[in-house]
Image (spheres, coloured by chain):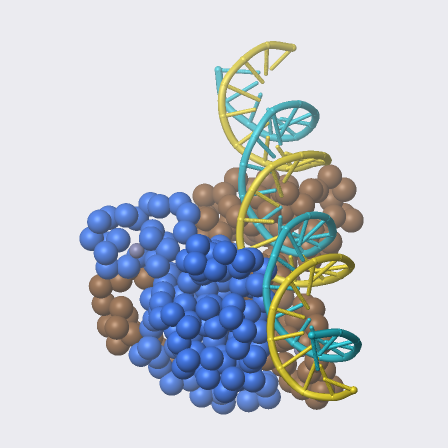
Chain colours: A blue, B brown, C yellow, D cyan
DNA sequence: TTCATATTTGAAACTGTTACAAAGTTAAAT
DNA sequence: ATTTAACTTTGTAACAGTTTCAAATATGAA
């Protein structure tokens, strides 16, 4: 499970690859589901008995700072983390809570947007609604997620 | 201050125009600054001595449900509220906290996005960075807002 | 005035996240 | 091997924004 590529990936972003950090990064690289902190912690805690949730928070925050991953703050139900740093949008299903990539994005030019005099450091595009599976199942009225 | 147009606006969205609701809606209509709950409460409390922050929360939630306003959840520092329900993006300055409208948006077609089988109910576009004023003042390293 | 209904309040609960001091780990220098 | 300094991790408590809820208040029709 301790993929050597994962340690190299962290090193290439100036992150010291501790055992816990490698485990968290590895999970993100191998589970492209935009997991929450709780999902990551729940998945890793059984096999890493000494892992604390604070360490998951610490690691993810560090990864984001070092631009090894990106964070998706699509609602106030818990941030999602994405090992893919390419510019892309996200769709969140209000029924099942799943987060889907939206890679086919229109080209956005800073001048065309009327933001010539701004310094843009980040752009996030969020869609919400119901995913194909939930549309089929008519699961249109769920509450949480 | 009790603008009759504001009561009519609420009524047209199926909202009973109580004194407090009219005050909150009125503030949003006359202050297009994407205010937070705290900003609204701080502005109204002096003149409406009996106003509670919970009522501001209640009113805004109702307005959003009835689609009389829209909510901008651009970060976890407090939701912003916008009397303009037209589809547009927002830019938040990381230095001064100001939220700016981005009306010149590219056209986004559901099929072109690869979301043909999804049911899209909402789309939000968020930019972050530094506004022209803060770029000039080189206020690039503020913490809060 | 009475009654039913709707609104508002204030306090407490809740959620995701952060701060922090103490404890543990690592590895270079001695 | 031992010391030392720097870094990592932990667990708890604090924090911020928001929601819940029962009690209090207001509204308005009969
Ligand atoms: Mn993604
Ligand atoms: Mn706006
Ligand atoms: Zn779904
Ligand atoms: Zn600014």
Q: Is residue A137 visible?
A: yes
Q: Quadrant of ligand 4?
A: bottom right
Quadrant of the rendered structure where residue B113 is? bottom left
Residue B92 is situated, as x and y percent measured from the top left of the image, at 59, 73
Rendered view: A4 above or below B9: below
Q: Is residue B63 left or right of residue A141?
A: right
Q: Residue at x 39, y 73 (%)?
A: A29
Rendered view: A95 above or below C11: below
Q: Is residue A44 left or right of residue D14?
A: left
Q: Nearer the viewer, residue B79 or B4?
A: B79
Q: Nearer the viewer, residue A86 or B35?
A: A86
Q: Nearer the viewer, residue B104 or B117?
A: B117
Q: Nearer the viewer, residue A99 or B139?
A: A99
Q: Residue at x 35, y 59 (%)?
A: A98
Q: Residue at x 54, y 73 (%)?
A: A18
Q: Residue at x 33, y 45 (%)?
A: A141
State which quarter of the image contains the C terminus of chain B.
bottom right
């Amino acid at each position: 499970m301790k993929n050597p590529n994962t340690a190299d990936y962290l090193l290439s972003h100036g992150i010291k690859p501790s055992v816990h950090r490698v485990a968290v990064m590895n999970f993100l690289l191998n589970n492209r589901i935009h997991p929450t902190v709780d999902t990551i912690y729940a998945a890793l805690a059984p096999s890493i008995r000494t892992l604390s949730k604070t360490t998951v928070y610490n690691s993810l925050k560090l990864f984001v700072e070092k631009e090894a991953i990106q964070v998706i703050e699509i609602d106030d139900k818990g941030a999602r983390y994405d090992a893919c740093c390419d510019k892309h949008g996200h769709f969140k299903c209000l029924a099942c809570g799943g987060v889907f990539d939206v890679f086919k994005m229109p080209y956005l030019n800073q001048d065309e947007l009327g933001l010539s005099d701004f310094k843009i450091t980040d752009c996030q595009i969020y869609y919400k609604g119901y995913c194909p599976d939930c549309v089929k199942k008519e699961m249109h009225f769920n509450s949480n997620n």
